């Protein structure tokens, strides 16, 4: 039996290390597709500016962001195979400059938005790329016997010092 122990590593530290290793392996820049836990302007800015890594992440649903969503005029939406998508620029705290946002208004009236630091990305790339990310979620769900749910936290926003499984040390009791 193996036991996962908490390494004390922060999300930013893990992300810098893992993206650095990934870039070394790929030997090129790449797009990091993340979930809302990685919605952090300073981290997105650093990855983009200093490491050449673009990020695609869902926007947080804040009151201010909801008001911004509602203010987007109908003529900004383009009909795509992914629904009506508005491609606009917005701001994120601690991100230097504008960031591209793909905004979709769902049939139930709720909004879904993706943000990217890659300013030449099209919605026809962003939406299917983000959709593929769910394969990871399904992996964890289908392989719960691995005990990933027993790590200190999978909610990185609430516990900013939680370790990712890739950085957890395994030890035997």
Image: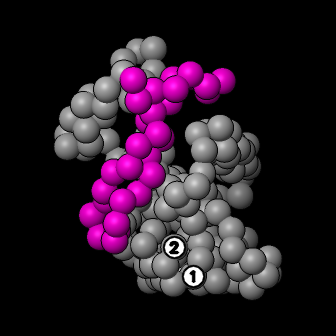
Which residue ends up furthest to the right in the rendered image? 26
User: Which region is colored magenta?
Assistant: 75-103
CB atoms of marks 2 and 1 within 8 Å = yes
Asked whether 171 or 83 is in front, the reply is 83
Asked whether 119 or 144 is in front, the reply is 119
Camera sees residue 145: yes
Horizontal side of residue 163 vs 71, given as left or right: right
Q: In which quarter of the image is residue 8?
A: bottom left
Q: Which residue is drawn at 57% across and 66% down?
A: 54
Element assignment for label 2? helix
Which residue ends up furthest to the top in the rendered image? 107
Element assignment for label 1? helix
Q: Residue at x 58, y 40 (%)?
A: 123
Image quadrant containing the N terminus: bottom right
Horizontal side of residue 46 vs 52, given as left or right: left
According to the image, label 2 marks what residue? 48
According to the image, label 1 marks what residue? 51
| Residue 73 x/y as whole percent | 31, 26
Q: Residue at x 64, y 83 (%)?
A: 20
Q: Which mark is residue 95?
A: none
Horizontal side of residue 100 vs 170, given as left or right: left
Camera sees residue 14: no
Image quadrant containing the C terminus: bottom right
Asked whether 147 or 93 is in front, the reply is 93
Vertical comparison of 73 with 35: above or below: above
What is the crowding at mark 1: few (fewer than 14 residues within 10 Å), some, or many (at least 20)?
A: some
């Amino acid at each position: 039996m193996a036991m996962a122990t908490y390494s004390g590593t922060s999300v930013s530290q893990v992300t810098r290390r893992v993206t650095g290793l990934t870039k070394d392996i790929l030997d090129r820049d790449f797009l990091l597709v993340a979930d809302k836990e990685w919605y952090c302007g300073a981290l997105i800015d650093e990855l983009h500016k200093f490491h050449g890594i673009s990020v695609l992440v869902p926007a947080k649903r804040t009151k201010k962001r909801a008001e911004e969503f509602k203010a987007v005029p109908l003529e900004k939406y383009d009909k795509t195979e992914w629904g009506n998508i508005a491609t606009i620029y917005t701001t994120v705290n601690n991100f230097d400059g504008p960031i591209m946002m793909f905004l979709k208004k769902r049939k139930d009236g709720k909004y879904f938005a993706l943000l990217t630091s890659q300013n030449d990305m099209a919605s026809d790339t962003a939406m299917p790329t983000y959709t593929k990310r769910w394969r990871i979620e399904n992996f964890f769900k289908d392989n719960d016997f691995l005990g990933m749910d027993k790590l200190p936290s999978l909610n990185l926003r609430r516990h900013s010092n939680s370790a990712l499984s890739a950085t957890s040390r395994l030890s035997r009791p």
